[in-house]
Amino acid sequence: MAAEDLPSEFDVVILGTGLAESVVAAAFSRVGQRVLHVDRRSYYAANWASFTFNGLLTWIQKQHEEESQPEEPQDWSSLVEEGEELIHLSNSDSSSISNVQVFCYTSEDEEEEVEEKCLNTTEEERGGADEVAVKETSETECAEPKEEMTEEADGTADREEEASHTEGQEPEADQPAPSAAQSQSVPTKKKISYAQLVKEGRRFNIDLVSKLMYSRGSLVDLLIKSNVSRYAEFKNVTRILTYRNGSVEQVPCSRADVFANRQLSVVEKRKLMRFLTSCVEETEEQQAYRGRPYLEFLRDQQLGDNLQHFLLHSIAMVTEDTPTEEGLASTRHFLRCLGRYGNTPFLFPVYGLGEIPQCFCRMCAVFGGIYCLRHSITCLLLDKDSNRCKAVIDSQGQRISCSHFVMEDGYVGADRKKLATPTRLISRAVLITDSSVLLSDSDQQVSMVTVPPIAAGCPAVRMVELCSSTMTCMPGTYLVHLTCQSVGSAYEDLSPVVTKMFRTAESPEQENCPSVLWCLYFNVTDGSGLEVEGYDLPSNVYVCSGPDAALGHDHAIKQAESIFQKILPDEDFCPPAPNPEDIIYDGDNPSSSTGEETEGAGEEAEGAGEEAEGAGKEAEGAGEVTEVAGEEAEGAGKEAEGAGKEAEGAGEVTEVAGEEAEGAGEEEKQQESLQTEE
Amino acid sequence: MHGRVKIKSTAQQEEEKRKEREKKLKIYVAARDACFSKRKEGIWDDEALQLTQQLLSSNPDFATLWNYRREILMHLETVKEEDEVQKIYEAELSFLESCLKVNPKSYGSWHHRGWVSARLPRPDWARELSLCDRCLSLDDRNFHCWDYRRMVVKVSGVPVDQELGFTDRLIGSNFSNYSSWHYRSTLLPLLHPESPEPPSPRRERPHSSPPPSPQTHSHRVCEEQLLKEYELVQNAFFTDPNDQSAWFYYRWLLGRAEREEMISCVYVSREEERVAVAFSRPVNAQSVGLLLVLDGQPQRVEWRSVHPRFKHSPVWICDLPPGTISDITNEHNLTVHWTEKHTHRDCALYTGRAESWCRDSATDQELFRSELSIEKTSVLQSELQSCNQLQELEPLNKWCLLTIILLMRALDPLGYEKETLAHFQTLREVDATRSAYYSDLCSKFMIENTILKMEYAEVRVFSISDKHLTTLCHLDQLLLVTHINLSSNQLQRLPPQFAMLQCLEVLEVDNNCIESLEGVYHLPKLEELLLKNNKISTLADLQPLASCPKLKCLDLRGNPVTQTANIESALSELLPSVTDLLL
């Protein structure tokens, strides 16, 4: 990975591997631009990354360290040509993360000690270093852990049972805290111990951002359009929950949900269904409420408290003072997304959200993009006359010329920010728990939970509970992400919700709630709060903001698309990648001159591509992002060409539409038929 | 990099495709011809098996080939060991699976699968059931698969509750599913049969007919389960009141067992020396073993239906040998036995009486509640309440309106008459394409109500004028009626069933749109027929009247037929008995 191997000229140099940057990279590479994509970090996806448990501990440690790390500007004046000016980039990574706090409630440890312990354990360092390797090969490894997990699932279930038997006994207080290494050797009969979490740390994929993919959102559309979807697998969020009157309830949002719901009366069911069908279209009545709160509109629909709560907090996911037009728009968006892949509007990528930027990076690499991690750009070289960035200087001191430069906003030096706009923050919490917030027939539920403000002035909290089949946590545990707009620190904002809904050392009385084994609080800058245009930068330098607080990914995708269109207004944004079968592999590799680095990246990408192909053929599991509509139609034809053989599994939702009529006709005769409809 | 994208001109692609298709067709036709010639020669070998497999896997709807294949397999059965046969059939099953992937709704494939499964020496029913599960999870309305599943369940003895659980799951994921609801309706009576004691001892049986056969109520469900089903189906139609499948199931739940089969009326007329018998359903009296006993003597009589058009009819008549009952000073006892159903009805003709009858009236039988349920009134009442609730929310939902009407009729047909009529009016408006259906249904209910009123008043006059009647029904209930007034309705014909009105003397049907008098046929007592302002247009239309011996008065004013030349003379020729003719 010697820097001298890098070519000295690119069309686009991209610094930072967050979602927007990665999409930009893929888009440029896809249309034949030469792309260099670097990240100072040792892992992909920046603040969009997912970590193993051990990787996360390393990350936490780094946040603590970097706060005190001074920056040493280097002298690159020898590389500066005439008429050029240096612009130094910031190289601090941690400025966007703050208020990191860790609590461990498992084993017998006191929280303070635990916090220290995780920061001091040397073992984790190694885990962190391995992180990248794990990430890069995660595709190939995934098949094998899957099987292991199913085998072990029974074991953990037993353990859990044991734990519940002994639940009644109070934990022996004030036992001296064993170190991580010790507790590993001492088998605890209680719930999953910290040592176990560390030992099984690789089974975790803990996202720094918590988002879901709207099944008709811009990210899903882009994944399908660009064929990047083949690099990942997705699961449907299986249920929408809400916290209300001290308990967790399921929100009925699809027809099947409404039908099966046991809490609503039949009249409420009718009102809900009617509201949901009627609000899809704009009416004069809705117009009349323009500018007035959505809540008022809902109240006037005579829906009752239950339904109002569901519609406002869980379906529209807005606050009580959101204007009606906005509330209706988000309700419609929610409804449009329903039923495309399942009974909820959301998808979640297996192995975590950190997969998504990486998938785009893979696409970029497949089309020749060059990747360097642990590699940064320290300076831009500004051509004073044109006010354009001519070249960049990387962390190895190499001068690389480029026509366009795209970077994550964290690298923009403080001196380049025009206005000190007050940065908004997002409060985040990550919990590892031992059971689901709402027990059901299946322990493999992926739940989206909306928690309205628990008191006046408190923020509304969004919670996503992931089960082990999403490959984000070890069997027997759940990974819970809490997110809200910051009012205070993450701990101040979110711990009241945690203690209400979970059993922790602070809330031992919540006996019927899931226990928190471990948790992390932190604040992260809200990417949507930054004014991307408001930088004093050369005209061909573009800035991508970090993750925003919204549930979907629209902000980042929109940003990427607008950057791409500014630079290449006539090119298609992420056109479909060709089918691997349509690619001719000829002996001469025209781009072999790009050196080892390229090949390395390329090989990885290719491997990923094959993987994805394999996955596509299986096409079993629920909620795969696969377009079926076209194939279906072919299969229906009488040609009997053996098409549509793979039409199993995926997309059942759309499938039946045409045949319904036929079936109806036939079956009707069986019923005592009073009258016949066609 | 990793290669370039192939670029093919569309013309080239087209050409390639065309060639490919041609090639395929050639192979297909050759294989087909080979199959046919082999079959002709009676060759049942492995090669034939392979050829048919090749063809069927691309076109599984080729019935002849399936037949050929069965012939081969049956032949192989005779020459191979059982183990080998088992293997052959197992291979056949996996081949069929691939055919079902090509066309999951192929009649041929499913039928053949059933055939193979039945012949398999050691069938694996669990596997078949899971195949059905899979197919139905892909398309829950594949009725081929439903049929096959029922067969598998029956043969392999899958517990009923397990199957009910299966329908729970399917309905839970999408309740718009006739098949699942229907399957439920067949499973519930098996799992939760109605308790054996009679549900409501609502009436004394005056004529000690034997108790109803046990089958009559066998498809009913016990009340506890029924209440759960009501709840389930209500959840469905409140969630989506426009989905018919749930409403149909609801109707089934509310519906009641078939009526007990019996002789509902025996009428005897001294003057005509004739006996008329009414049954609870249309029968063919010539083949059900009807026996007439007069004063202890079995009579040899010839039963005939009231109109030659009917092979099955609820009313049958016979003439007694002349002189047997004509003496008015004699008393006679008559018994009609329905030997097939072990039931009978007695009738006594007393001295000095010209006629006599014995019957269960419509009110006794709660006849018109048969549309819906014999359930407890309280249950129906609460069902009506929830439907009314839904109707408040969805005032224009036709399924809801119709169900409300049916519930009201089951509860109190006369009490709810006004509401019923209003709902019918709404129905005709919201569902204009079916307005004629609603009008007919409404006519039926109006007739039922009028019959009830007549029964309560204990008269033999049936009057229902100016009620927008579009059709006539329940005429078997009017066997004893002497006066009928149907004037100012929208009737277009007096249907053949009209011939059941054996006692009718005066018929008023002024101001209708009647074109046909087919049913005014051999009405022995009809004297007066008022047909003013109808649409009788030809003399031939009046032909049936010639069969009514006592017709004296006929009012034809305002009919097109009156414009016919020489109408008067033609009529006096056709209807010599008519003395009072109005033209």
Image (spheres, coloured by chain):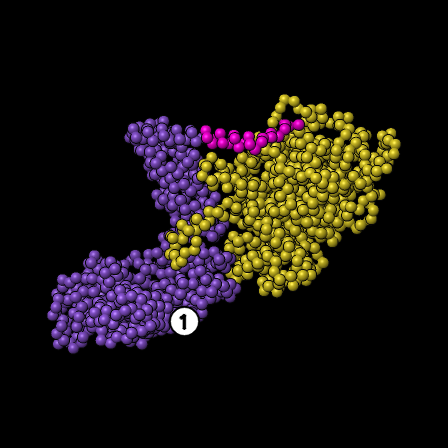
Chain colours: A yellow, B purple
Coordinates of residue B78 in the picture (x, y in percent)? 28, 30
Position of residue B487 in the picture relative to residue A100 (left or right): left
Q: Nearer the viewer, residue A621 or B441?
A: B441
Q: Is residue B10 magenta?
A: yes
Farthest-out residue, bottom: B352
Position of residue B133 in the picture relative to residue B532 (left or right): right
Residue bearing mark 1: B417
Residue drawn at 17 percent across, 70 percent down: B272
Residue drawn at 39 percent across, 69 percent down: B468
**Can residue A480 be seen in the rendering of this structure?**
no
Farthest-out residue, top: A587
| Amino acid on which disc 1 is placed | Glu
Coordinates of residue A244 in the picture (x, y in percent)? 61, 57
Coordinates of residue B580 in the picture (x, y in percent)? 24, 76
Q: Is residue B466 magenta?
A: no
Q: Quadrant of residue B29?
A: top left
**Magenta segment:** B1-23
Q: Residues within 10 Å of mark 1 (few under 14, many from 20)?
A: some
Considering the image in quadrants, where does the N terminus of chain A appear? top right
